[in-house]
Image (cartoon, grey):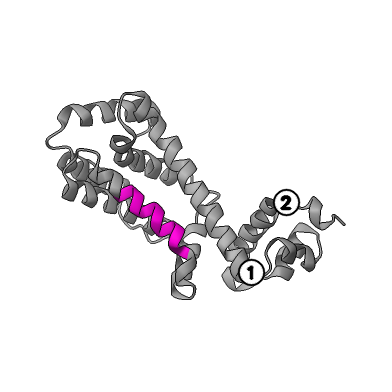
Amino acid sequence: MPKKGEISRQQILDASKAVILEHGMPALTHSAVAARVGISKSAVHWHFPTKVALLEGLIEDYVRHLRSEEARHEAPFIEAGLSAEEAVLPSMWGWFLDFRCNREGWIGLGSTLMSLSLTYPDIVEPIRQWYRELYQKIDQSGVNPIEGTVAMMVFDEFFNSSKLGIQTLSIERLKAVEDYVLNQAYANKPETLALIRRVMVKTHPEM
């Protein structure tokens, strides 16, 4: 059996995610994680002394994932000449298209972790902060701030309803809504919207 020092923090977090995705948040215990990794419960406690510490670790790991995905989806727009702030809104569009086509991995985990705000409101603060930063970038991007906020909220709702399995709109309706909110947000920046669409055609030929 591996010793405490031989088990990485990330292995424990990965095992914790698997427990949550397969059996739900109530099944997440130090014992369940230890059994998943194949170590003693004390080894899990060595990295995460309490369940709250384990949940905080999962939140931190989830936010790292969010930032990594945000940067990955922003990259083609930045390479095309947009600033990091200008790239935020189109990156959410591309991210949702990827999520719509590939719903493996993190699906379900985000909504489960965000539901912790009901019982552990303080530990979800890093997720709130990530959202604050997104909307601050929208305000700095040059798009109409109200219409840009509406577009961001639409994409966020698409994400969340898909995660929960309650997305009822057809692909045609989703595309129509996407086009509408983007046209509104970039009504005064048609050249930027044209560039965004060119990038999207290259990165998402299926759209």
Judge the density around disc 1: few (<14), some (14-19), many (≥20) Cα neighbours within 10 Å: many
The reply to whether the magenta stretch includes residue 179 is no
Relative to 36, is 3 on the left or the right? right
Q: On screen, 142 above or below 78? A: below
Numbered range of the magenta stretch: 124-135
Mark linked to residue 49: none
Residue 55: quarter of image: bottom right
Per the image, label 1 sits on a secondary structure element best described as loop
Q: On screen, 14 above or below 112? A: above
Residue drawn at the location 38% of the way across and 31% of the way down = 204
**Is the N terminus in the top left, top right, bottom left or bottom right quadrant?**
bottom right
Q: On screen, 202 above or below 37? A: above
Q: Which circle's residue, 1 or 2, is located before the other in the chain?
A: 2
Q: Amino acid at mark 1?
A: Leu
Give the residue furthest to the bottom.
119
Residue drawn at the location 23% of the way across and 50% of the way down = 149
Mark linked to residue 28: 1
Relative to 128, is 90 on the left or the right? left
Residue drawn at the location 41% of the way across and 36% of the way down = 73
Q: How many marks?
A: 2
**Is the C terminus in the top left, top right, bottom left or bottom right quadrant?**
top left
Judge the density around disc 2: few (<14), some (14-19), many (≥20) Cα neighbours within 10 Å: few
Estimate the spatial distance between the alpha carbons at disc 1 and disc 2, rounded to whole Å: 18 Å
Q: Majority secondary structure of the magenta segment?
A: helix
Relative to 111, is 18 on the left or the right? right
Relative to 144, is 153 on the left or the right? right
Mark linked to residue 8: 2
Per the image, label 2 sits on a secondary structure element best described as loop
- Residue 99, horizontal then vertical, whole percent: 44, 45
